[in-house]
C-alpha cells in the first residue's frame, strides 16, 4: 500500500495536473480500493463510537437511578468504584474518540487539508483537556 502511495506522490511532485506521464489503470484501481476500504473502516469505527456512547449513556442513567434509591445510595456512595463509575465511563468514551481522531490523522490516503487537520487536532486537544481535568 505505501509503495503505491509513494509512486503516486512522485507523479504528483514531478508533473503538472493535466500532464504526462499517464498512470496505469491498475494503480487507479488500487487507490480506489484503498480509499473504499479506509471509508468502510472509518464508517465501522464511527458506528462503534456511537454504540459506546449509547452504552455510556445507559450505564450513566443506571448509576444515576441507583444513586437516587435510598436503600442503595449509602452503599454506593461509600464505594469508590461505584462512586466514580460514571466519570470512568465518560473518560473511556472520550479516549476512544481521541484515538479515532488520531487514526483519521494517521490515514494519509484521506489527503486532508491543513484546515481539516488543524480542526481535528483542536478537537483532540479539547477532549484531552476534559479527560485530564477529571
Image (cartoon, rainbow, N blue to C red):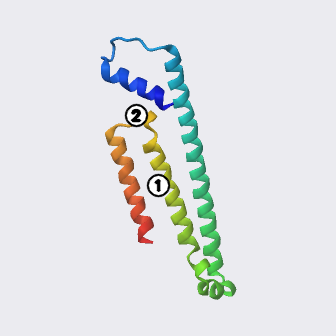
- Residue 125, quarter of picture: bottom left
Give the residue displayed 51% in from the left and 14% down from the top: 25
Residue 19 lies, in percent from the top left, at 33, 12
Q: Residue farthest to the right?
A: 71
Secondary structure under badge 1? helix
Secondary structure under badge 2? loop
User: Where is mark 1, residue-wise?
Assistant: 98
Instruction: Tell me the crowding category of disc 2: few under 14, some 14 to 19, or many 20 or more residues within 10 angstroms, Cα based.
Output: few
- Residue 71, quarter of picture: bottom right
Label 2 – label 1 distance at C-alpha: 19 Å
Instruction: Tell me the crowding category of disc 1: few under 14, some 14 to 19, or many 20 or more residues within 10 angstroms, Cα based.
Output: many
**Above or below 14: residue 118:** below
In depth, the one of 26 and 96 nearer the eye is 26
Give the residue displayed 64% in from the left and 75% down from the top: 65
Residue 29 lies, in percent from the top left, at 53, 20
Give the quadrant of the C terminus: bottom left
User: Where is mark 2, residue-wise?
Assistant: 111
**What count of labels does the image hold?**
2
In depth, the one of 102 and 91 nearer the eye is 102
Amino acid at each position: 500500500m505505501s509503495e503505491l502511495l509513494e509512486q503516486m506522490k512522485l507523479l504528483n511532485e514531478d508533473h503538472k495536473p493535466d500532464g504526462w506521464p499517464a498512470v496505469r489503470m491498475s494503480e487507479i484501481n488500487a487507490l480506489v480500493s484503498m480509499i473504499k476500504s479506509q471509508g468502510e473502516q472509518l464508517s465501522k469505527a464511527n458506528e462503534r463510537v456511537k454504540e459506546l456512547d449509547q452504552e455510556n449513556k445507559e450505564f450513566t442513567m443506571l448509576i444515576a437511578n441507583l444513586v437516587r434509591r435510598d436503600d442503595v445510595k449509602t452503599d454506593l456512595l461509600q464505594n469508590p468504584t461505584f462512586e466514580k463509575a460514571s466519570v470512568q465511563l465518560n473518560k473511556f468514551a472520550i479516549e476512544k474518540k481521541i484515538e479515532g481522531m488520531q487514526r483519521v490523522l494517521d490515514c494519509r490516503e484521506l489527503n486532508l487539508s491543513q484546515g481539516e487537520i488543524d480542526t481535528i487536532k483542536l478537537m483532540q486537544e479539547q477532549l484531552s483537556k476534559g479527560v485530564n481535568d477529571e
